[in-house]
Amino acid sequence: MKKCTRKWKLKGFFLVVMGITFVGLETATDTINMFDGLFMTEVHAATTEIGTANITIDIADWESGLERHYTSSNDADIYVHWNAESSASVFMDNGNGYTETTLYDGNSKTGSTQAYIGMGYTTVNYNVVDSRVTTATVDTTIAATATATTDTIATTVTAETPFSLSYQSHISDIGWQADKHDGELSGTEGEARRLEAIQIKRSDSLPIGDIVYRTHVQDYGWLNWVSNGESSGTEGKAKRLEAIEINLTDDLAQQYDIYYRVHAQNVGWLDWAKNGESSGTAGYGYRLEAIEIILIEKNGEAPGPTIRSFVKYPTVSYQTHVQNIGWQHDVSNGDSSGTTGQALRLEGIKIQLTDLPYAGSISYSTHIQNIGWQNYVNEGLLSGTSGQGLRLEAIKIKLDGEMAQKFDIYYRVHAQNVGWTGWAKNGEPSGTAEYSYRLESIQIKIMPKGSEAPGKTTGAFLENPKVVLNVPFVSQLTPTYAPMGCEGASLLMGLQYKGYSSVSLKTFLDKMPKNSNNPFESFASSPYKIVNGVFQSIFPGALTAYGKTYSGKVADASNFTTTQLKSEIKQGNPVVVYVTNEFAAPKWEISFMGSAGYVRSVDNMHVMTLVGYDEQTGNYLVNDPNSYAISQYWVTKEKFEKAYNALRYAVVVR
């Protein structure tokens, strides 16, 4: 069948098909699809009238000589043609050619006419608004002969609607989609298919100017700008689009803004970008899956939110303070900061985040020689030391806020005698403990939540089961003879280890507060000689008070369990412990202690400094001041805990 070849461009028309009823036909079902609306029509029987079409038409933008063409699902052609300002006709295929029937004669704003098509005629009921008439067509699919009394037929209405721009995308496993127009979705949702290329075209009715665009392509980066229907992207290479920029030129740019938004993998719909702004993601390797594009009159209201149209990958940058070198330059995203093969220690570190796609921050803590774990700091502050010659031994890094929900932070260190450790993440320790090994270099990476680790994760933190603090030894017998001065000698060891005091034992004991017989208040009697009838000691509360005159980090640790004692040692804090002489069984007696009255006490009590433990054997390491020579030795778990648990007296130096 020869098709009508007449065509006219139609601008500004509005069409609503209200209902179509057919009679005397066998049942058939299809879809009416027009202006994104879905219309289903029931058909009922009659003899010669095979249907009705109810049409509302808007002619506010009428132009003389326009015709609207519709194509049915069975390839029949129907046209509505404007003859003059107040006259329109409908042309319908009757099987032997086209029949012309007047649709609107310029009189009544509502009415009907009969258009013959094949087996009978269709009654077209029209309603005119805005004083002008648009085009309309009904294309019918007739499935069989008119024998049934109640039959259903489905019709598809197809219209050539005016548009200002069109675009089509090339989709993985599908190829080029059909053109989409003015804000329609091009691509897919929920099918995990990548956009691979795009073409964007403008309408001839627009002002002078081009639509220019470029895409960011997997493994290629940003491609060159193209325009007006040219393809941007790739075909046949399985490369995803990751972002896009679209802009206007010349008069078109003066009169319009172009808005666009994309649907990105793992993100969903982003907000609207406009006029050359980036839309999509950067650094994630996420595919674009769909796009919508629309022209808006210059400075008109945006079609939706515009805050978050482009999601950058966050950058973690860091710099380290290196022995004999000082502060190195910033590095980022997995690069090494520090040195290897030069035996130079890291002494401090600063870490910060930039280009945050979500609210949050980064915080970190380091384990420092002779100090232990520091408190967490964040966003570019120093963790560690500068100018003190103290090595970093381990580090913990974590994300906070919404960033912690969206990303993992991975890090690994190069440690003395170890090399590169495995990767730790999200606050786990990385480095070594109780080996006195220096950190020499570090790498830090930020990755989407749940991503595969950048490498092996075993061996991220090596902890020596034997913890030993290098606490200096102080004798209570030489050069100063203080047979009752074990408490003072033990505390002085801890203070010297932490760098809080460098005084001699003689000076330290001389300055210690004293009274005649109450060790709860200060030292009872003298540490330099044995006085009968007096319990010559200074108990933890009074000893702590004296220790605080040297450092506020001296604390009463009485009633600590042995687990707590080991925890302090693990953190690098020596502990003054009240045990028994030579770890013999406690000998209890009642002693007079001045204003405190008679107090049950351990007659063979002795005080020393706890400086280590071995988790494998359970043994404890002590510095015993009651010796002329350095006296450091291991005590079995059973002996130490029996002697210590008698009183549970202790003082910690942190």
Image (cartoon, rainbow, N blue to C red):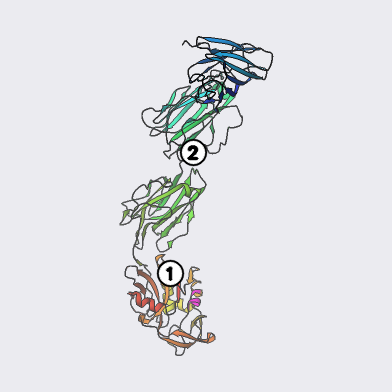
The picture quadrant where one finds residue 238 is top left
Specify the farthest residue to the bottom.
Answer: 532
Circle 1 Cα neighbour tier, 10 Å, few/some/many (<14 / 14–19 / ≥20)? few
Looking at the rendered image, the disc whose residue lies closer to the viewer, 1 or 2, is 2
- The reply, left or right, for residue 293 in relation to residue 439 is right
Q: Nearer the viewer, residue 496 or 79?
A: 79
**Residue 564 image label:** 1
Q: Position of residue 127 (x, y in %)?
A: 65, 20
Q: Nearer the viewer, residue 372 or 138?
A: 138
Q: Position of residue 610 (x, y in %)?
A: 39, 72
Q: Residue 98, relative to residue 339: is it above or below?
A: above
Q: Nearer the viewer, residue 124 or 536?
A: 124
**Residue 505 image label:** none
Q: Is residue 357 visible?
A: yes
Instruction: Give the labeled residue for mark 2.
Output: 268
Cα distance in 3D space between marks 1 and 2: 50 Å
Are the residues at dot 1 and dot 2 in contact (C-beta closer than 8 Å)? Answer: no
Q: Is residue 537 magenta?
A: yes
Q: Residue 303, relative to residue 599: is it above or below?
A: above
Q: Is residue 475 visible?
A: no
Q: Earlier in the sequence, mark 1 or mark 2?
A: 2
Q: Is residue 444 magenta?
A: no
Say which amino acid is labelled 1. Answer: Gln
Q: SS for tag 2?
A: strand
Q: SS for tag 1?
A: helix
Residue plotted at (39% across, 28% down): 234
Circle 2 Cα neighbour tier, 10 Å, few/some/many (<14 / 14–19 / ≥20)? some
Range shown magenta: 534-544
Residue plotted at (48% across, 35% down): 263
